[in-house]
Amino acid sequence: MIFARQIHAFSFATGLSTLFARSRRGYRVIMFHGVGDTHMPVEAFEAGLRWMAERFDVVPLSRVVAGIEQGRVPDARGEVALTFDDGLANHFEQAYPVLRRLGLPASFFVCPDLIDSRRWIWNQEARARLHRMTPVARREFARAEAGLDAEDVERVVQRMKELPLADREHAEAALRQRTPAFAPTPQEHESYDPLSWEQVRQLDPSLITIGSHTLSHPILPTVDDVVLRHEVDESRRVLEDRLGRPVDLFCYPNGAHDERVYAQVLRSYGAAVTTNYGFAWPSSDLHRLMRIPASAHLPLMAWRMCRPNA
């Protein structure tokens, strides 16, 4: 790990990261989640965007999609698209002012039902509640509701993601019953509160493209065909009705998809992004576009522009 960090720092300081990145003539789709927390402070977010904008062409995701459709190879400078998952209020409050100030386009993937109900994404709530429990209580919950002998929060959440939808919702209800005194902290509100429709309407459509992240962020391979169609198709209908413009981009919740999910998204949208790490190429499947995870540590982010799995 220390050696890797030294390589990243040296490559960043000498410009080798950029040189290596430009030798790989692919498209880069950057994946962000929350902005303004300890994982992505606003200052680091802006520094990263300025670094990218100076060295690459930051373009709308729709331009990357068009380039792939045309089989066009990016020039040596390269094209980068910025994407934000989960439809969080901090995307409007923290990320959008920076994007607007720098004039950089981006895509925000949102969940209409969560906006309507003012609910967090279910795994964010589960994670926060699990952290309030003692290790013994977490293990007891995991055994009873998830068939898992573990107290580690991330292992429990991962197991809940794998449950069929009805079982997962049952586990969520049980978790709420076990944590009746739970109340979000101010920091949790800043990290997990969803966008409001008023905030969505205030986003400049010439700069921010809205895409679907389903209605309520279920793990799609765990739902039946009826729920799948509803989550995928109804989210597009609601967004288009609310925004008065086409919505043709999709983001798989948690990146999870199988052939059944893929086929439904293929029928409903022009392109979709995954959470798999990698470049997008002129030969890429438009409905399985790979992305590069954002990092607040600029030398690592620069290295990922040539080695996405770093």
Image: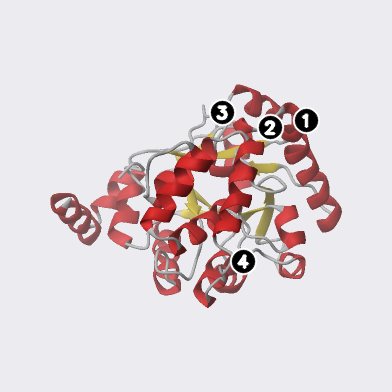
Q: Amino acid at mark 3?
A: Asp
Q: Amino acid at mark 1?
A: Val
Q: Residue 193 has which mark? A: 4
Q: What is the distance, in whole Å, between disc 1 and disc 4 at their CAs? A: 28 Å
Secondary structure under the numbered disc 1 in the rendered image: helix
User: Is residue 52 toward the left or the right of residue 184 in the image?
Assistant: left
Q: Residue at x 55, y 57 (%)?
A: 178
- The residue that disc 2 covers is 265
Of the image marks 1 and 4, the number of the one nearer the N terminus: 4
- The residue that disc 3 covers is 285
Q: What is the distance, in whole Å, between disc 4 and disc 2 at their CAs? A: 27 Å
- The residue that disc 1 covers is 226
Which one is closest to the eye, mark 2 or mark 1? 1
Quarter occupied by residue 206: bottom right
Return the x and y of residue 238 as percentages of the image width and height.
82, 50
Q: Nearer the viewer, residue 151 or 231?
A: 151
Q: Residue at x 60, y 31 (%)?
A: 221
Of the image marks 3 and 4, the number of the one nearer the N terminus: 4
Secondary structure under the numbered disc 3 in the rendered image: loop
Return the x and y of residue 14 as percentages of the image width and height.
20, 58
Which one is closest to the eye, mark 3 or mark 4? 4
> CB under 8 Å between callouts 2 and 3?
no
